[in-house]
Amino acid sequence: MIIEIISTGTELLLGQIVNTNAPYLARRLNELGFDVLFQSTVGDNRERMTQVLSVALARADVIITTGGLGPTQGDITKEVTAALLGRKLYLHEPSLDHIKCFFTRRNLNMSDNNLRQAMIAEGALVLKNSFGLAPGTVVETEKNTVIHLPGPPYEMEGMFEQEVAPYLIQRFGDQGVIFSKTLRSFGLGESALEEEIKDLIKAQNNPTIALLVRGGEITVRITAKASDQQSAQKLIDDMEQKIRSRIDKYVFGINDETQELVTGRLLAAKKLTVALAESCTGGLVTNRLTDIPGSSEYLTGSVVCYSNAAKISAVGVPASTLEEFGAVSSQAAQAMASGIRNLFASDIGIGITGIAGPGGATDDKPVGLVFIALADKKAMQCHQYNFIGDRMAIKQRTANTALSLIRQHINAL
């Protein structure tokens, strides 16, 4: 059973509206066991919409469209589909009554163009819209099933749950489940991580394996299809063990677990505290840590010491260190880590300094040069990095790396 989702609307192609309908439908259809193998987006143009629908009719069993059911001349989804399938449109009186009631209840005048929303292809099953005006439709042929849903997400989601999901289950029966689990990793690049599990990827069948890059992290998604979730979970568990045997030291969490969540959880479990002196990150690491409820249990304090004067007065970096080595140096980062730890009497002190760009670089200190130091009661460690990207990307990569260093340090205790 192959499903294709077609999102219509020129506003989607112009980037004026973010398409949330396609991800929603894909997720829900997968949860119901249906394979979504294609997604397309097309503007409100008859010729191009005809091309897209023609391709979908040739390769998919079920086509679900969103958008183009409104009252304007640009709302042409039903018309194009009817023409392709050789169906005439007629005025569906129950739908018209629903639309008229909508306007009557609000003491509004109904425009003549609202009649377009009640035009239905011959032989189509009408889907009730309890969330708006335009009805949805299901057009069945010998080879395909075409389902039209409205574009507004509130209407589309409500109609899918109320009308489409029950229809699909009744029409096509139990499709089993498609279940996924993601392993979130940091510290190993995409190509290097793939090398570690390349043989598993090449041999994949069910479950499948996919690598995704997200904000400097590498996510390994494992997806299984089975008759029920328990069976799918068993397939995933077996594959997860094989993958973890290769890359477990880089895996920090699963599914929606963030680095700040996992790092905070470790700090709390070990009853350790941390304090941060941030320069180039501008408090980003602290912000992410405090996004987690209960972070006051392990975060004792933070200082954004951006200027040299702040580094000296707020966290006690010696002026001589800055004069001799500069603010962006391992010596400055270590002094920041030690100073912030002493200032807030924390178990761990973190010092971060670097050049986020685009300005401020020199021949020997380029944009992206970052030093992160970690101090505890036993030792001091400092790491040098050369990140690439724009200012925000460098700040995010620095924050990710700082959180990873804290996590690795705790795990090594």
Image (tube, rainbow, N blue to C red):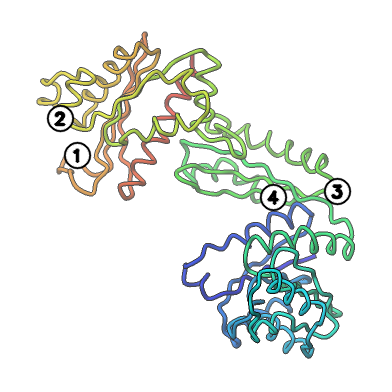
* Residue located beneath label 1 in the image: 365
Extreme residue in the front direction: 107
Q: How many angstroms separate mark 2 from mark 4 (CA)?
A: 50 Å
Q: Amino acid at mark 2?
A: Gly
Q: Earlier in the sequence, mark 1 or mark 2?
A: 2
- Looking at the rendered structure, the kind of residue marked 4 is Thr
SS of the residue at dot 4? strand
Q: Position of residue 322 (x, y in %)?
A: 14, 25
Residue 337 location (% of width, % of height) = 30, 20
Please tell me which of labels 4 and 1 falls first in the chain.
4
Q: Residue at x 63, y 42 (%)?
A: 182
Q: Residues within 10 Å of mark 2 (few under 14, many from 20)?
A: some
Say which label, 3 or 2, has the lower sequence index.
3
| Residue 227: assigned label | 3
Spatial separation of the CA atoms under disc 3 and disc 4: 16 Å
Hey, which quadrant is residue 34 in on the image? bottom right
- From the viewer's perspective, tell me whether residue 357 is left or right of residue 67: left
Label pair 3/4, CB-CB below 8 angstroms: no
Q: In the rendered structure, are the residues bearing label 3 and label 2 in contact, judged by CB atoms less than 8 Å apart?
A: no
Residue located beneath label 2 in the image: 326
In this figure, which residue is indicated by the disc labeled 4?
208
Q: Secondary structure at mark 2?
A: loop
Whether tag 1 and tag 2 are in contact, CB under 8 A, the answer is yes
Mark toward the start of the polypeptide (2 vs 4) = 4
| Residue at image point 52% right, 43% down | 218
